[in-house]
Image (cartoon, rainbow, N blue to C red):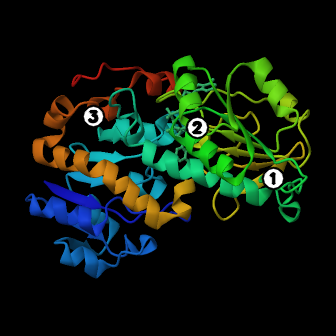
Amino acid sequence: MNIGIPKEIKTNENRVSCTPAGVRHLVSSGHHVVVERGAGEGSGFDDNQYRRSGAVIGESPGVVWNNDLIVKVKEPILPEFQFFREGQILFTYLHLASAPELARHLVNSKTTGIAYETVEHGGQLPLLSPMSEVAGKMSIIMGGFYLDKHQGGEGKLLGSLPGVLPGKVVILGGGSAGVNAAKAAAGLGAQVTIMDINQERLRELDNLLPPQVNTLYSNEQHLEEMLLDADLVIGAVLVTGAKAPKLLSRAMLQKMKPGAVLVDISIDQGGCFETSRPTTHENPVFIEEGIVHYCVANMPAAYPRSSTEALTGATLPYIKRIADLGFEGALVMVPGLSGGLNTWSGHVTHKEVAISLGLPFHENPFI
Ligand SMILES: NC(=O)c1ccc[n+]([C@@H]2O[C@H](COP(=O)([O-])OP(=O)(O)OC[C@H]3O[C@@H](n4cnc5c(N)ncnc54)[C@H](O)[C@@H]3O)[C@@H](O)[C@H]2O)c1
């Protein structure tokens, strides 16, 4: 199959969808790979490394997008919509529930859109997890940084000091992002509470996490109580394919400590705090009701080397199977991949995505 790897053009996005080692694996399996000039630079991979792996370097986005299977990192943005066409397979993060314009273009062009974040296997989201793991760890680094008084924070260190109590971290959602945030916060010595609505998951977390991490069933009353003295709140909930539920209202913020910090990891699904709006790495925070909000929708872009390697490790087996079998064959043969089909032949084929967008749902024919 002819595979195109475009350079990511979203603000400050430095990841690339495949490492040179991954390209080598695809080329040695008989596939033709075109990598856009400079696509790997932000992650520390130059064009010569891709050439040595057997790729052709594409001089322009048009050349790269003119292939059968386009593998990306982030959801396409406006300048990329012109390249969509019938018969093309787009394999990337799509987050369509919060991107109606992108969904409209994919549907109108009859592009086959397979979203990393809705591929499901064994009750897990194997293509979302690597980036959630990065974002979870990073949320504590960023949260701790913005608690700095000079950054608008309350001036509280997350770790304990002799004779001084540690910072309090509340994490909403105990999935891949949440558990990594909890481990990072506990590693600093913070007092951590992780909240989820899945009782079975809470039981697993209780066994898995260090003793200073408490688990708590997530409901409005528990959340209100926890927020009163929280220093850092991490939003890491997910209902697959759907817009994130709004768990923290403006009224709740008013009861929090001024200078506390919120990190809304779920912002790529619309955000789980009422006052969240997407920000960028250039301008990552804003203050509402005296509370610092960090709402960067592509957090792992800050650590592109680690993120690109982690992403390729997860996606490569799926890319290879799509290229080997064609998307119809792969959707039928590869467990969980069919859950990734979001748009096909002019239809929205993922139920939660269709509901979130208010568009008609068309049954996925490959399940
Ligand atoms: N901003 C970024 O750069 C970035 C990067 C990676 C992932 N993400 C996002 O992070 C979010 C979390 O991803 P994940 O892989 O950890 O998901 P996950 O599915 O592994 O975990 C989500 C958890 O949220 C829980 N949950 C659902 N509704 C809840 C509620 N009302 N209250 C409490 N818990 C609830 C679920 O039970 C589940 O345990 C997703 O929206 C994902 O897209 C963002």
Point out the tag, 2 or 3, that comes first from the N-terminus: 2
Residue at 44% across, 43% down: 129
Mark 2 touching mark 3, by CB under 8 A?
A: no
Point out the tag, 2 or 1, that comes first from the N-terminus: 1
Q: Is residue 342 visible?
A: no
The amino acid type found where label 2 is placed reads Leu
Which of the labelled discs sits on residue 209, or is there none?
2
Residue 113: percent from left, percent from top:
33, 40
Which secondary structure lies at badge 2? loop
Ligand 1 resides in the quarter of the picture at top right
Q: Is residue 66 above or below residue 337?
A: below
The amino acid type found where label 1 is placed reads Ser
Residue at 79% across, 29% down: 249
Using residue 181 as the reference point, say whether residue 80 is left or right of it.
left
Ligand 1 closer than 8 Å to label 3 CB: no
Find disc 3 in the rendering and name its residue.
337
Point out the tag, 1 or 3, that comes first from the N-terminus: 1
